[in-house]
Structures are given as C-alpha cells and as structure tokens.
Amino acid sequence: MDSIIRNIITLGLPTLMLLIARVATGKTGDAATWSALRKIGGSFGMLIGLGVLVFVGFVANSFSYFVVDSLLVRFYQKRRELEKPEQLVTEIDKLPITNDLKIKLKWGLLHSNNQIISLKHVILKWFMLAAIVNALLSITGYLGAFNLFFELSSHFKLQYLLAGLPIFIFFALVRSKKIWLLVSAFCIILNLAEIVPWYFPAPAFAGETPGQNLRILHSNVLTNNRRYSDVISLVKTEQPDIAVFVEVSTVWAKELAVLSEIFPYSSNLQESDRFGSAIYSKLPLENTSVKAFSKQRKSLFADVNFQGKIISLILVHPTVPIKQQNFIDRNKQLAGIGEYAAQVKNPLIVVGDFNTTMWSPFYKNMVKTGNLRNARSGFGILPTWPTFMPLAYIPIDHFLVSKEIGVLKIRTGRNVGSDHLPLITDLVI
C-alpha cells in the first residue's frame, strides 16, 4: 500500500505540471506535449523541460517517503502511550505495506522510549523538508507563465541560493545522505546560474566620449511617505540631468514642485489622489504624452533633446500582481511596453517600478521583444524593494536601454523613507 501511495505522489506531481503546461499551450496531441516541455524548460529548451519533470518526480518521491513514513511512525508512537507494544507489533506485521516500512515502524515503536522522535531525527527531517521546499520553489519560478503564484516564486533567486548553502553544508557533513546533498547542490547551481551573469562585466561602449554622459535618478517615493525633504535632498546631492518619480500623490506633487527651480522642464501625470508620475529634466522635453499599455496605470512618454540628439524616455509603473486581474493587467502592460519599444526609432530608455524582477518570464519576453537590456547588467542584481524587510530584498525597479545607449554605472541610492530604494544610473549616448 505504501509503495502505491509513493508511486501516486511520484508520478502525480510531474504529470500535473505537464497537464497544466499542455492546457496553457492551447494545442492538442503530440504538439501540445512538445510545446509544454519547451515551456517548462523555458529558455533552456525541451530537453531541460523533460529534465525538470524528472527532477520534480525525484523530489516528489523523496517527499512521499517523508510523508508516509513519518506520519505512520508518529501514529504508532502516539498509540504506544496507551497500548502494549507487543499488540502494535503484531498489527504492523499484518499491514499491507513493504517490509522496509514495517521494520521502520517497529524500530520507531520499540526505541521511542515515549518520545515521539529523537532530536537528531527531527533536525534531519527538517533539513530534508527544507531541501524539498527550496527545490520546489527554485523550479516553480520557471513555470511563472502559467500561474500567479508560480511567477511570484521566480523573484527570490538570491534567497533560494542563500537558503541552499546551509542545507548543502549540513548534508555534506551528514555523509550518509548523499542524495540530499545532490538536491541541495542542484538548487545552488540552478540559482547561481540566474544570479552570477548579472555580475559579469558588460562590454565596453564604443561610443563613449567626454561630455555625453547622462545621469538619471528614479525613485518610487511611496504614497504615504512623508520624508519629502529627504527625497529633494537626494536629488540635489546626486545632481541628475533627469529625475523621475512614481507613486506621486497630489501631496507629493506639490512637494516635488520645488524641483522646478533646478529642472526647468517637467511632465506630470496624476491618475488619482494617491497615484501619479512625474518627470523633471534639465534638458528640453518634447512630444510629451501619456501611453496606455493596459486598462490600468498609464505611462509617461517624452522625447529628450540631448546635445542635438533625441532620446525617447518612458516612465512606467505597472500594477502590483497580488490579485489575478492585476496579474493579467501587469503582464499585458509589460507585453505592450516591449511591443512599443520595438517600434521606437530613437535611442530609448524605459525606467520605473516594474513590479517584477529579471527572472519573471513576462519580464524576459518584454526585453526580448523590445530589444532592450537592463542597465544593471554587469553591476549586480541591486535589490531595491522592500526596505522594511531586507531579507526579502528583490530587484523590481529597472532602467532598460536600447542598444545605442551605454551604461557607465548604476547603483542604489540611500533610503529616503520609501519602501523602495532609489536607483541612479550614468548613461552614455
């Protein structure tokens, strides 16, 4: 009986994943299966998709042992407090389970000494469970195109890597658990592959010449933040050529108006009392307009006249994907940004709080469609949110640039009371 349950769990999870992926393709027959495998494999292709299903089956099988064995051992150890061990042993011998599980149950029953599980056993089980959870979360992010919660799990690659290190060290010391050592090593390699490339130096920009540098500061000021002077002080300290802001309430709009003393050109969008966007510039702004990439939050567009060159700038702030409808709207907006960027002839900068990280499949489709690259490439992942929970830091604020624009530097600014850190970049045109 226990082997049947294990087989159901082992085959059930990868089968369910494959069925969900098949439905999402909109195809039928063999074509749906191959397309589903390619989707699961993401940018790595169909074979990796198959490998992911095999790995999920392996993890599910290991998890089934944890569930079935642990629950039965605990069940009989609790009964031992009220019943005679000899009667329970006789009962175990009659159970329709494998001999291996019978031996485990008898050992757990006769050696419990009225204690449910030894401390060593508890620690081992918790590390096994941690390895399982870390593995599943590391994998489900690649299925983000199918589900809101899968997509949410794609954002925490750094946290999965940091969690995987102590798990790997533990199983390296517990030499008898080599299979779990492999699982934890797989998680580390998988997440390293997503993080390390962001630290590889970007190729030098051939067009770099003195006097053509452009500094831009971006800040999600947070609607209910009241540290107006801190934001304004940061702008004065950093001395950007252009400063852009999102989550600009009507109160924030009034407070930021003082920046007109420094920036003679500006463009503002006030969608509600709580939400708006603003661009302040030392350079002339032309063709300012509002772009609607979805039904919800709109984006500010402007052409910047920079030393005789026209650079297009889009300030975006898609919706927070915590509900299904918002998730759909944000994804539609990201897709629209990518499609629009592909049509822009001028050098292009897309900046804002995207409410997604670089590891989301929707982000990846956007930059691929729009022929854009993230300015933080070569400078690290630079997490920007949430400032109130540093252990959960993820990079959701971005500067995206077209191929004509080089990046000299990008960095986060100091905390100005928002839940986002400002992001400052020096570009070369």
Image: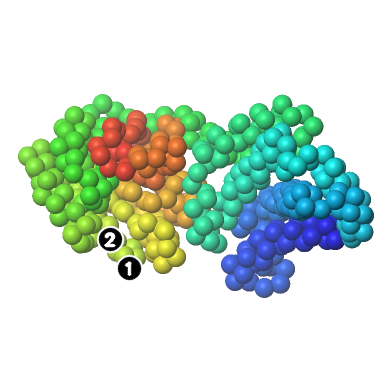
Residue 136 image offset from top left, x and y in percent: 63, 49
Of residues 324 and 111, the one nearer the viewer is 111
Residue 231 image offset from top left, x and y in percent: 19, 38
Vertical side of 220 occupied by 270: above or below = below
**Numbered label attached to residue 295:** 1
Residue lying at 40% horizontally and 37% vertically, measured from the top left = 390
**Numbered label attached to residue 298:** 2
Image quadrant assignment for residue 343: bottom left
As helix, strand or loop, the secondary structure at mark 2 comes to loop
**Numbered label attached to residue 359:** none
Image quadrant assignment for residue 104: top right
Of residues 120 and 263, the one nearer the viewer is 120
Residue lying at 36% horizontally and 35% vertically, measured from the top left = 406
Q: Does residue 428 appear in the picture of this structure? A: no
Vertical side of 154 occupied by 185: above or below = above
Q: How many marks?
A: 2
Of residues 127 and 88, the one nearer the viewer is 88
Are the residues at dot 2 and dot 1 in contact (C-beta closer than 8 Å)? Answer: no
Residue 69 image offset from top left, x and y in percent: 78, 50
Of residues 192 and 404, the one nearer the viewer is 192
- The reply, left or right, for residue 159 in relation to residue 242 is right
Residue lying at 77% horizontally and 35% vertically, measured from the top left = 177
The residue carrying pointer 1 sits among few (fewer than 14), some (14 to 19) or many (20 or more) residues within 10 Å by Cα, namely few
Quadrant (top left/top right/bottom left/bottom right) for the N terminus? bottom right
The residue carrying pointer 2 sits among few (fewer than 14), some (14 to 19) or many (20 or more) residues within 10 Å by Cα, namely many
Q: Of the residues shown, which amino acid type is indicated by label 1?
A: Lys
How far apart marks 2 and 1 lie (CA) works out to 8 Å
Q: Of the residues shown, which amino acid type is indicated by label 2?
A: Lys
Q: Does residue 299 appear in the picture of this structure? A: yes
Query: Residue lying furthest bottom in this view?
Result: 28
Residue lying at 22% horizontally and 49% vertically, measured from the top left = 224
Residue 301 image offset from top left, x and y in percent: 24, 54
